[in-house]
Amino acid sequence: MPKFVIVRIPGTHTDWRRRNPIPNLGVGFLAEIAKKEGYKVTVLEGHMWLDMGYLPEELDYKERIQFFFKEIKLESPDILGISVLSGDLALGIELAKLYKKEYPKTFILMGGVGINGVAEIVARYAGNSIDVIVKGEGEFTLREVLKELKKGPKQNFSNVAGISFRVKNKWLHNPLRELIRDLDTTPLTTLEDYKYLPTNIITLLPVERGCPSACRFCFATETWGNGRYFSQERIKQQGKILLQFQKREKVLFLSGGYPKFRTRFLQVKIGWCIGLETF
């Protein structure tokens, strides 16, 4: 079974600790897509590792890259995904360069909010160290990329919307993919593939995607649009799954707002703790 590893490498702008580690679920959605395509998956969530102290915050720029290089090397991925925020771009590119140099046969993708709007710049700096850049929402784009990779030498990314891809030394830039209209069509995510998951996590329960603003300095709107929502039933299902991984804290936090509902979280010892009430 081929191995897919996805990593979030935090830049120095995120070097602060929270009382409870908070795992990012965006990479979890991608992990579920990869599993459905027949891959063994490991999630290396560097921002959570920073919260829990596994990633020492005193590491400098080069030491942090070496730290993640060693973690990825332990997993021996066939496909490596690197997810970045804007402040993580430089670290992500340098990590890709280092890993590609040592393991040139590893297929490397890069995506995340930090990519959007700057894919052509990233491609220019990354050169041959990255094979595909994922722009916009990643779930269904990743699924198509993985399907193409299964074709071996016959793979062709020219019809995959939402990516920039490399053919030898030349980068080609496909148009953005349309936003997912029905968010409930994305897979429910678990945390079972997150390496070194601590017991004291608190999870941000995904409720919506998008931003009501249209700030020109931010790529959030380009990435997520102006607001789409998961259904009430889907939110409940996702909450029940996530709470199974929270061994100490049985409280979830909202990631976004929800129209026509207010969400109340009840602290309980077992079970799920979501109550949605209409106004």
Image (cartoon, grey):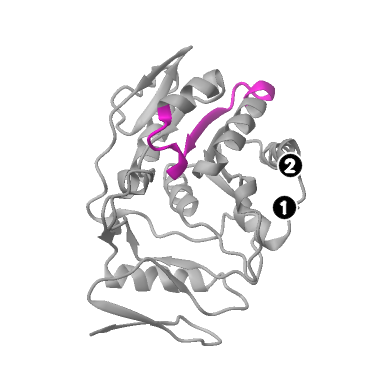
Magenta residues? 100-119
Q: Is residue 122 above or below residue 140?
A: above
Q: Is residue 143 left or right of residue 196?
A: left
Residue bearing the label numbered 2: 67
Proximity of marks 2 and 1: CB atoms separated by less than 8 Å: yes
Q: Looking at the rendering, which quadrant does residue 4 occupy?
A: top right
Q: Which residue is at 33% across, 69% downward? A: 257
Q: Is residue 105 magenta?
A: yes
Q: Which residue is at 74% across, 37% downward? A: 66
- Disc 2 marks which amino acid? Phe
Report the Cα–Cα distance between label 2 and label 1. 8 Å
* Residue 166 visible within the image: yes
Q: Is residue 175 magenta?
A: no
* Residue 112 visible within the image: no
- Disc 1 marks which amino acid? Leu
Quadrant assignment for the C terminus = bottom left
Q: Which residue is at 48% across, 49% downward? A: 31
Residue bearing the label numbered 1: 55
Circle number at residue 167: none
Q: Which residue is at 37% across, 55% downward? A: 187
Mark 1 surroundings: few (<14), some (14-19) or many (≥20) residues within 10 A: some
- Residue 176, percent from left and from top: 29, 34
Quadrant assignment for the N terminus = top right
Front residue (pair 20, 247):
20
Q: Considering the numbered disc 2 on the image, is that residue within a helix, a strand or a loop?
A: helix
- Residue 275, percent from left and from top: 36, 83
- Residue 34, percent from left and from top: 46, 44
Q: Looking at the rendering, which quadrant does residue 141 occupy?
A: top left
Q: Looking at the rendering, which quadrant does residue 52 occupy?
A: bottom right
- Residue 142, percent from left and from top: 40, 39
